Image (tube, coloured by chain):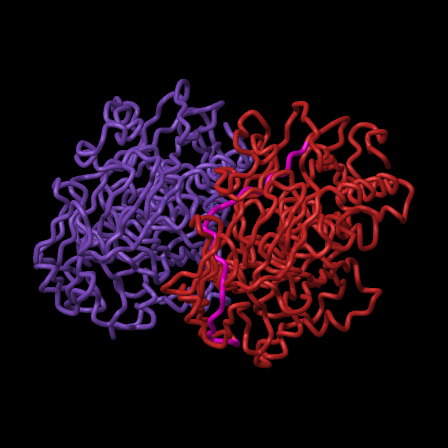
Chain colours: A red, B purple
Amino acid sequence: MAQRVRDVQRWFTEFGRYAYTEVAPIPLDGLSGWHRDRDTGDIRHDSGKFFSVEGLAAQVPLGPVPEWTQPIINQPEIGVLGLLVKENDGVLRALVQAKVEPGNRNGLQLSPTVQATRSNYTRVHQGRAVPYLEYFRDHRAHHVITDVRQSEQGAWFYRKRNRSMVVETTREVELRKGFTWLTLGELYAMLAEEDRVNMDLRSVLSCLPLSASGVDTVLRSDGTGFRGSLVRSCRPSAGARHSLGELLNWLTDTRAGTDVLTDRIALDGLRGWRRTPETITHESGQFFSVIGVDVTAGGREVAHWNQPMIRPRGQGVIALLVARIDGVLHALMHARVEPGYLDVAELAPTVQCIPDSVDVLPAAARPPFLDTVLSADPSQLRYDTVLSEEGGRFYHALSRYVIVETAAEGIEHPEFRWIAVHQLMELLRHSHYLNVQARSMVACLHSLLAVPATAAPAVPSMPTGPSTAGVEGS
Amino acid sequence: MAQRVRDVQRWFTEFGRYAYTEVAPIPLDGLSGWHRDRDTGDIRHDSGKFFSVEGLAAQVPLGPVPEWTQPIINQPEIGVLGLLVKENDGVLRALVQAKVEPGNRNGLQLSPTVQATRSNYTRVHQGRAVPYLEYFRDHRAHHVITDVRQSEQGAWFYRKRNRSMVVETTREVELRKGFTWLTLGELYAMLAEEDRVNMDLRSVLSCLPLSASGVDTVLRSDGTGFRGSLVRSCRPSAGARHSLGELLNWLTDTRAGTDVLTDRIALDGLRGWRRTPETITHESGQFFSVIGVDVTAGGREVAHWNQPMIRPRGQGVIALLVARIDGVLHALMHARVEPGYLDVAELAPTVQCIPDSVDVLPAAARPPFLDTVLSADPSQLRYDTVLSEEGGRFYHALSRYVIVETAAEGIEHPEFRWIAVHQLMELLRHSHYLNVQARSMVACLHSLLAVPATAAPAVPSMPTGPSTAGVEGS
C-alpha cells in the first residue's frame, strides 16, 4: 500500500499543476457580485442565493458567557456530500476527488465524489454540471448505504446542514480527470497526512458503517493493545459503560434543560465587533474575522469569483480523550452547546477550542480537559494531525486533531460521557447527534484500525474479501 | 381483569363528581388575562407565558395546495409528559391521573402521571405544585426507561414539542387523590373505550419499549392469526419488508426533497380567514376555528380561567392500514408534511384528515387510501374507537382511530412504506420520526396484544412475571 500512497501523492502533485486557486484578500465592501444590505448591513449575493453573512444574538443564561453577538453565515439550503463506492474482488473502493477550495492553505484536498450545494445542482452560477451528481440525485438504481442529514459548525453557521450519502453502484463508472478510486485502507493512510482529507470527506466517511460489505473484514481480528480495544469498540456486540438509553436520556436532559435563545439580528447591530470597509473583527482581536477574497481558479467549474469568508484567529485544538474500559475503547464525548445548532446541543469531541481565544473568556469558560490534552505525554498520542475545516467558507481554518489515550478512572463530569465507538456509529445513522468535529474524529478513529502504511509491508486487517490478492497496491 | 376495569370506571365516575370543568364559549376579544397585540392582532397571555395564537404563511410548492395562511399556536416551551411506573411481584404498573381538560367532551380522561408545561413547574400561574413532578425533574435516583422529545400536531402547533419520559421507581409512592395504578393490560383495555385515554398518555405509552422488565412476557407467545402476526412484528428480530436503512433513506429523501417554507405572520394578516370579535373562522367554514372559552374547574390547580382554543370542524379520521407480510404485521406509514414540524415531514398513519374539510380542497389533495378506509368491511377492522387530541388546547377535537387489516399486494405509493412495529419502536427512541397521531396508533396497536377484557376470564399474555398470581384483579 505504501507504493499506492506514493502514487496518489504523485497524482496529487501533478493534478495540482492543472487545478489551482489564487486567493487574494480584498475589502468586504469591494466584493464583486455581493452587496451590503441597505437596512441591516448583511452581506448578500446579488442573486439572493448561496449564503449571506448576518448577525446573531445568542443567550445561554446558564453558560459561562451568558450572552453575546457575532457574525454568522446563513446558508439555508441543504447540500449533498456524496461518496460513490464500488466493490471489486471483495474490496470496496471510494471515488474521491482532488478539489481546490479557496480556504485551503495547500490548495488541493481529497473531497467526496460530489460536494454540491443546492445552488450547484440547480446551477445558479451558470457553471458546468457537477460530475457524478446523477448517482445521488437518482439513486434508486443503486444501493444507498448511508443517507443522513448532519449539522456543520454551529459556531459559524446558522443551522446549516448537509446531506451525507454513501451510494454503492455495480455499474461501470467513467473515471474523470481529478478523480481516483481509493480503498478504505488508502483513505485511512491519507488521513494521517496533514491537511490532505477535507472536512466533507471526513464527515461522510464517518457515516459509512463498518458492517458494509467489503469493509467488515476489518473487525474480524482484534488482539491485544490499543488497536484490539478499538476493534472491539467498533463491534455492535461490545459492552459499554452506558447503555444507549442512558446516553439518550443524558442528551435529552441537556437539550431540554439548557436555554439557548438565538435571534438573527442586523450585521450592523453587533456589539463588541468592529466593522471597516475591509473586514469585521472582534474588538479583542480573537475568535474570528469576516474577510473578503478574490479567487481565480483553474480546473474548477468557475474561473473567477469574489466571496466573503470566515477567518478564525489562530489554530484550533480538537481533542478526544479515549480510554480502555473492560478492554473496549471509549471516547469521552462532550454534550456541547453551539448557537447555530438546530437542537441546542450535539456530541462533540472532548475539547474543541482556539486556545488563544480561550484566554480572553472568563475563567469558567476554559474548556474542561484542555490542560489534560495540552500536557499529554507524546506516548499517549494515538493520532495527531493538522486538519482543516471546510475550505469553501472558512479561510485557513486549521485545527490540530489529537486523540489522547488516558485512564478512565477519576474522569467524571456532568457534561461528558464515555461512549463506545459502535454507539457513536449507531447515533450516526440519525441526524444531529454528532457534530462535524466529532464526525471527523470518528473517521480518524477508524483510520487507526489500519496499521500505518510505513510500519508494515502488508495491511493485516484491511478489507480483503475472499482472497488477500484483492488489496490493490498493497 | 374485567372486574378491575369496572372498578376503575366506578372510580372515574366518583372522581368526576369532585373534578369537573364547566366550559362556556366567550368572545375572543373578551378573554380575561389575554390581549390582542396592537401591531399584529396576535392573541397573547398578559404574562407573556403559556402560548399565543399567531399567523403562519406556508408554502409547499410541489404540494397539492402550494400555499396558504392559517392561525397557529406558538408554544415554544418544552413540557414534560411523565409516566411513573413501578414493578411489584413481576408486574409493571403505571401511575395514571384522572384529569379534566377544558377541551374534553367528557370531562375526565386518563392522563400521564405528570403533564406539565414549563410554565407549570416554574409556576407562572401561581397554582399548586404539580404532584409527582420531582420524579421527572430529579430523575437520577430512578431508572429512566424512556426520555425523548416528540412533536405535537404540526397542523395546529408551530414546532411544539413535548418531552416524553417513562421513569421507574423502586420507592414507596404515596397515592394522591385522582391517581391510580394500572397494569399495562388494564391500560390497554381502557384504550378500547371511547375517549378515555388522553392523547398525552397514548403518546408516552407508545414510547415504552415492550422489552422493559415486567412487560416483555407479552411477546413470549405468538401463535397464529392477526395477534400472532402482531406479536412477531413487535419482536426486534422479526423480518421486515424494508431495512431500517432503506426507511431512513426514504425519509431523508422526502425531507431533503420537499420545500416547506413557513413564515410567522401577523394573525391579522391571514388571507381566506374571517376574524370577528368572537372567533376566527375559515371562509369555507371548514378546517378549524379559533374560539374563546371561559373555564371553571374543580379538582384542578386553578379554579377559573379564560383561554383561546382551536376547535376543529367535524370529526377526523385517523386510519392505519395493516397487512401481514411473511407472517409479520406491517403498518402502512405516510411520510407526511405539516407546516409546524421542526423537520419537514414525519411518519404519520396511513390516513389523517377531517373528511368534511377534504371536500373543499383540490381533488389532488384527497388523501390516498381514504376511500379504502371508508369502504372497509367491518370484518377488516381491528380497532375502531373515537379518541380526542389534547384537551388543553383543542376543543372537542375528536377523531375516529381505526386500524384496518388488508392485503399488502398492489399497495405501492412513493409517499408510503410498509413498516414493522419493531421498526416503529426503534424509531421512537429518537425524536421527530413519528408524529403524535402515529404514536397514538402505536399505543392502539400495542393494546391489541391484549385479549379484550370481556372476551376471556384471564389475560393470557399480559405481563405476569414469575407467577400468574401477579396480575392484579384479573
| B424, above or below B81, in the image | above
Instruction: Name which residue lies at 46% across and 53% down.
Output: A45
Is there any visible trace of residue A193 in the rendered image?
yes
Near-viewer residue (A421 or A472): A472
As drawn, the residue found furthest toward the right would be A457
As drawn, the residue found furthest toward the top would be B410
| A324, above or below B363, in the image | below
| Residue A332, image quadrant | bottom right
Q: Position of residue A123 (x, y in %)?
A: 50, 38
Near-viewer residue (A372 or B7): A372
Q: Is residue A462 left or right of residue B209?
A: right
Q: Is residue B168 left or right of residue B10?
A: right
Q: Is residue B163 left or right of residue A90?
A: left
Q: Which quarter of the rendered picture does the C terminus of chain B lie within?
A: top left
Is there any visible trace of residue B220 in the rendered image?
no
Q: Which residues are magenta?
A: A64-85
Q: Position of residue A371 (x, y in %)?
A: 71, 74
Q: Is residue A86 left or right of residue B209?
A: right
Near-viewer residue (B61 or A177): A177
Instruction: Name which residue lies at 69% across and 63% down.
Output: A319
